Amino acid sequence: MSASVNTSLPLEYQTEQNRFNILGFWIFLGAEIVLFATLFAVYGVLSERYAGGPTHQDIIIVKEVMIQTFLLLTSSFTCGLAIYEMRRNNVKGLITWLIITLLLGAGFLYMEINEFIHYIHIGASMQESAFLSSLWVLLGTHGAHVAFGIIWATMLIIQLYKRGLTPVTARKTFIIGLYWHFLDVVWIFIFTFVYLKGMVL
């Protein structure tokens, strides 16, 4: 028995299974919001417990933070363009913008890894203080999500090359777009409550 298809809806919403999967992913994002809210709360409590170790001003490199922010926020824009091309049924454009999105995300991840290496070199490892422990966990969790997103999107690109644009690949593309935008929103909060706050203290 084939699933009913409503061709008046966008491709990713045309089957009932796709609609349930997208709803399920929204619920998953709700759980992710709780996770990051908890990490932000922990950081808020511990953010000034330096234990005589490095403080915000000692570890933040403003130029690199701004570049990281530019890369990730630009990747959110290019991800939106990928969804736009999907809605136009332009597989080549979709794949092109997804690849650009991943390159920007990889650039962000590269700079974040360098940031962690910098922290270690200046003696700001996560064992030094409660502040640094909460910072490492918050940034590391977000970075791990970005890395997972890159791997996930790479696998999707391979599927798009092999199968083209179908209700299934459209649904997967839409879901990963939601995931990527979520990571960008989380980064805005990190930039505001970790880096920006640290710059003005």
Image (tube, helix red, strand yellow):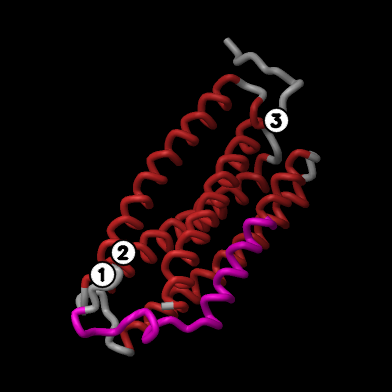
At x 70%, y 38%, the residue is 165
Name the residue furthest front: 201
At x 27%, y 79%, the residue is 125
Q: Mark 1 or mark 3: which comes first in sequence?
A: 3
Asked if marks 2 and 3 touch (Cβ < 8 Å), the reply is: no
Q: Give the extent of the magenta segment.
A: 51-78
Which label sits on residue 11?
3
Question: Viewer-nearest of labels 1 and 3?
Answer: 1
Side of 88 relative to 51 (left or right): right
At x 42%, y 68%, the residue is 194
Neighbour tally class for label 2: few under 14, some 14-19, many 20 plus, Cα within 10 Å: some
Q: Distance between the residues labelled 2 and 3?
A: 38 Å
Residue 123 drawn above or below residue 83: below
Name the residue furthest bottom: 122
Q: Residue under circle 2?
A: 137
Mark 3 residue element: helix
Residue 165 drawn above or below residue 97: above
* Spot occupied by residue 126 in the image (x, y as percentages of width and height): 25, 74
Question: Viewer-nearest of labels 2 and 3?
Answer: 2
Q: Distance between the residues labelled 2 and 1?
A: 6 Å
* Spot occupied by residue 131 in the image (x, y as percentages of width and height): 27, 72
* Spot occupied by residue 27 in the image (x, y as percentages of width and height): 44, 33
* Image quadrant containing the C terminus: bottom left
| 57 is within the stretch colored magenta | yes
Asked if marks 2 and 1 touch (Cβ < 8 Å), the reply is: yes
Q: What residue type is labelled 1?
A: Ser
